[in-house]
Structures are given as C-alpha cells and as structure tokens.
Amino acid sequence: MCGRFAINATPDEVAAHFALADIEGFPPRYNIAPGQPILVVLPAPPREPGSNRPAHQSMLVRWGLIPAWSKDPANLPMLFNARSETAAEKASFKAAMRHRRALVPASGFYEWRRVGRNKAQPYWVRPKDGGLVAFGALVETYAEPGGSEIDTAAILTTAARGDLAAIHDRMPVVIRPANFERWLDCRTQEPRDVADLMRPPEQGLFEAIPVSDRVNRVDNTGPELQHRAEVPAARDAADPARPVEDRQLKLF
C-alpha cells in the first residue's frame, strides 16, 4: 500500500526532474495523507514545431480518486491506491488507466511493519541515492451534481520484493525517467503496452529507515518524522497507523 508519502525537494528540483514549466513555490511536505492535495504530472498539450515549451504540465488534485460514474462519493471507500495488476479491469479505474495516467513526484513514502498484534514500526522508505522518484498514478475529474468539478487521483501499487517485502507486501509503482513519455502517452500506449512499467522496481533502489510513530498523526508535519527512531516495544503504535494502511478495501 501507499498511505503516506513526502516531497522534500524544491520547486526548481521538481520542475527540472519532470520537465515542467516553472511551478509555484511550495514548502516541503513531510507527511502527505489521503484526502489532501497532491501534485501530479501530466503530458502538456501538443507543441508547435520548434517550440521550447516544457514536455509536461502539473496540476494539484485530491489524493483519493472519485470515479466519474459515482452518484454518491460519500458512500465510496477512499480510493487512494489502485492495484496495478487489476486496474485496467476494475470499474473504478479502467477509464483512467486507459486515458489519464499521471506521475506523482515524491521523495519517498512511509510504510508500517507489524511487530505484534497491536504494534507497528513505521519506516521512511527513500531512494538510496537520494533525489526524487515518480509514482505511477491515475487521474479522474469528477463532476459534482451542482456543476463544479474536482480533480482526483489514486497511486498505483505493485508487489514489494526484497527487503521491502519484509515490511509490507505492497509498494507504489515507480516509473523511471526513461519511461516517463511512454507511461504518459495515453494516445498510442494502451494499458497492456505499459504493463511492464508496473513491475516491482529493481532490488536496492530504496532503503528503509525506522522512524518514530509520530508519523501516524496527520497533524505532525515536521522533518523530524524522517529521523531514525525505533518505536518503543511497550507502546501500542499500531492503532494510529491502521486507519491509513487498512482502511482501503483489498478489493480495490
């Protein structure tokens, strides 16, 4: 699963990594949770020959996809993740998988490892070499009955492997820079054409750092959340984390 992530990079670093036009300044965000706004990267409109316009554009969306066909989103679970293996067939995601694939810039993500019936150890999972990664994502625009629209997104997940599998069996899909264009090209690349991009990343890409269970609370947002720390064995650390990790039905 991917229930929390962070982006520590500057706007200039994000713009350079994702070939974006200058984007408005934003502070580092160390504890991004479902329901909050997140930055997504989309293909830019077709360019004039010889144009210097950047290849991609950015947009703020709500993290938690609302299918276009939904009549009452309040009765839907929070669709903040989508299983990559089945997204092309699921009613909630198949239209976005075919027509609206996106990238989510991130510096890393948090995951929880169960250490007992009522305990969990959070980990900050980041690229070993630092820098940014891109999560594969799906975007959907939902038209509310009153006529207003809301842009929403879900992050795709895949099977974890290696050391990460010992923490949790799922992790975000990671799209490498060499594959950005193919992933975002929904005009000529159907879901079956990009299925290979949703496989688990190579072993050794990430490192997992145990961190304090302060990350379990959404209102804790400082950089200290990423400092190495062990959850004391006597404390019950699981309950605050469970709403993030277990709230979404396995069906999705």
Image (spheres, rainbow, N blue to C red):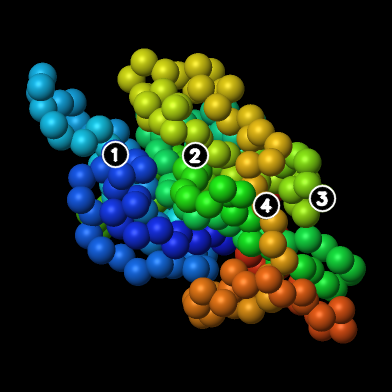
Q: Residues within 10 Å of mark 4 (few under 14, many from 20)?
A: some
Residue lying at 39% horizontally and 51% vertically, measured from the top left: 152
Q: Quadrant of residue 244?
A: bottom right
- Asked if the residues shown at circle 3 and circle 2 are in contact, with their CB atoms under 8 angstroms apart, the answer is no
- The answer to whether mark 2 and mark 4 are in CB contact below 8 A is no
Which of the two labelled residues, at mark 1 and mark 3, occupies the earlier sequence position? 1
- The residue that label 2 is drawn on is 136
**Alpha carbon distance from label 3 to label 2:** 22 Å
For discs 4 and 3, the disc positioned in front in the rendered view: 4
Q: Earlier in the sequence, mark 4 or mark 3?
A: 3
Residue 226: x %, y % from top left: 59, 69
Whether pointer 1 and pointer 4 mark residues with C-beta atoms closer than 8 Å, the reply is no
Q: Is residue 62 left or right of residue 236?
A: left
- How far, Cα to Cα, is label 2 from label 4? 19 Å
Q: Position of residue 97 (x, y in %)?
A: 46, 31
Q: Is mark 4 in CB contact (under 8 Å) with mark 3?
A: no
The x, y position of residue 17, in whole percent, is 36, 43
Quadrant of the drawing holding the C terminus: top right
Q: Amino acid at mark 3?
A: Ala
Q: Which residue is mark 4?
A: 207
Which one is in front, 99 or 70? 99
Amino acid residing under circle 2: Gly
Q: Find residue 227 and report its image quarter.
A: bottom right
For residue 167, what is the image quadrant? bottom right
Q: Which residue is mark 3?
A: 166
Q: Is residue 143 above or below residue 101?
A: below
User: Real-space Cα distance between discs 1 and 2?
Assistant: 16 Å
Determine which residue is flagged by label 1. Answer: 19
